[in-house]
Amino acid sequence: MSDSEQKGLSRRQFISAAGSALGVAAAGAYVFNQMDFNKPPISNETPMPPSTFSVKHMESDVLVIGSGMAGLFAAVKAHDAGAKVTMVSKGRLGSSGLTPFAKGIFSYDKNTSNMSIDQFVAKVTESAIQTNNPVFTRQLAEHSKARVEELKEWGFFDSPLYNETFSRPINERGIPLHQRVMITHLIKENGRVVGASGFSLDKPNLIHFKAKTVILCSGSGGFKPSGFPVCDLTHDGTIMAYKIGAKVTGKEWNDGHPGSAKNSGSSYDNWHGQIEEKPQINGAEVRHDLGVDMNYQAYKIGPPITMGPPPMGPSGNNPKRPEMTQIKGGPFVPSAFRHRAAPPPEHEGGILALFSGKKPGGGPPPGMGGEQVGGSSAGMAIHKSEGLTPINETGLSTIPGLYAAGDALGSHMSGGIYAQIGSSLAGSAVQGAIAGEAAAQASKKISSVAISSSRLRDIEQEIFAPLKRKRGYRPAWVTQVLQGIMIPNFVLYIKKERLLQAALAYVEELKEHHVPMLIANDLHKLRLAHETENMIITAEMKLKASIMRKESRCSHYRLDYPKIDDENWQAWINIYQDEKGEMAFEKQPFGTWASAT
């Protein structure tokens, strides 16, 4: 008998009580929409029958999935290495995902930088508390300038609109581009990836792409939080790869980009520069930006109406903002979030000094001022810290022939923190270029690939399943329930096992019962159905990885394990499917490569 039953609570009553707690919005992280949890399943009265779809087949050497910064360089470099390349994207070239909102790009110039590459890598490693992979950190510094010079040639720094810039190298090379096509399946035959399948979002076309190698540049994802442009990214690439046996990493880390309380759509541009601005080049400056501090403040001292930076003075008090007064005798954040090397005293400079390592009076990091809230990027991890687990420096995954780059690759380029403004955009460019050339070279060693017709029929049935169901749940409603479970800051950011387990019970229920009942009657709802399933699997990964890591480090904070545990947790967490298809976990020691599946 469980503890709850011994105390007079049935399992149903326990889950109900836990749900009441999880139904409270996270302070400064999310404002709930009204949800009718008693709404019954609905009828799919006007379905779009699968018989209306045309099935198309396409073939190339290298298939690039995604059209952001990583996808651009992957396609260009694969083509330039002699491969026949096809690019496919759920959005529009250079205009979807997170790429168009990033306005700063890192460029390391050894002739002007005040630190060497070795010093840069060492500082990032120190700031990341060893969670970074130094190989990818070094890649960033060594190759960023060359990628920036190519972007200059294409006119990237002349306009805030990226589509025109990205179109130039793609059109010059004649690379076929399929936009607004949602890829739902990666195809594996004889132990290696051989293509992908998906459907058009504009007309009833189902497309099978055959390829010798595939590069995932599909970005990261979240739970479609309000006030952050991650809403069209739902970890599609990661979950597709996981389903064919790839290892996934980094799910316990949490991005903490702030959002604007005045303009909920301006969260990302507040951090990286206004959306209408042209992109700018940033030099080497190692930072320690998380955003988790705001969630911790809200949890410990209550939510302010607006969450700007805490006061930057010795007293820690702000007469104009009494709700932000520092608690006497206690820091705003645990020591696990801070630099290892001599952080400033807790009373000097407040939390921003603890995070950035700057002395009092230095001011907040760029983008941290104003009326902002934390957690508007809920469901996303720190840039480059989550995604497919690489087995080498080219971004090759544990599945032969399957590469990843950018936010789709769990490279841990800066570890479980955000260490360098502009490094995300630069890292995507660098990793995309390296993966593109590697995939092109690998494709030359493969004479041809074949996909069984039975496998294609199975994929078609899985894609069409929500259209064929007579009754079920609308994906938007299921997504809203998922948001209510996952987005509260006392589940996603301020973690403890009791609440993580309660949230997991709900998420497993959604996975086991609601996913098989998702319905759609048009192309938009069909997209939502597949996105909702991907977010639910991601939520399960994040909760289980957070339960597994019984320590606090960087952007992962456990209220019940508030200290760093170097004895047991000098390791990344990989997630994969075991022989029974169940979600399994392993530790990968820092500084090592994962083994192939």
Image: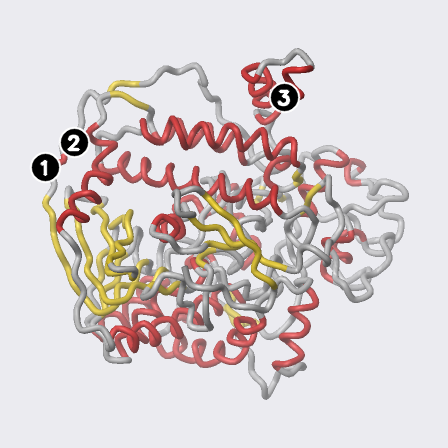
Q: CA distance from mark 1 to mark 2?
A: 7 Å
**Can residue 446 be spotted in the picture?**
yes
| Disc on res. 332 | none
> On the rendered structure, is 360 left or right of 111?
right
Q: CA distance from mark 2 to mark 3?
A: 47 Å
Residue 497 at what x, y percent from top left? 65, 36
The residue furthest top is 8
Tag 3 residue: 2
Residue 481 at what x, y percent from top left? 46, 27
Mark 1 closeness class: few <14, some 14–19, many ≥20 residues within 10 Å: few
Marks 1 and 2 in Cβ contact (< 8 Å): yes
> On the rendered structure, is 171 left or right of 529?
left
User: Quadrant of the image for the N terminus?
Assistant: top right
| Residue for point 61% across, 74% down | 284
Q: Is residue 375 above or below residue 5?
A: below
> On the rendered structure, is 136 left or right of 567?
left
Give the structural element (helix, strand or loop) at label 1.
helix
Q: Nearer the viewer, residue 335 or 96?
A: 335
Amino acid carrying mark 3 in the image? Ser
Amino acid carrying mark 2 in the image? Met
| Residue for point 68% across, 53% down | 553
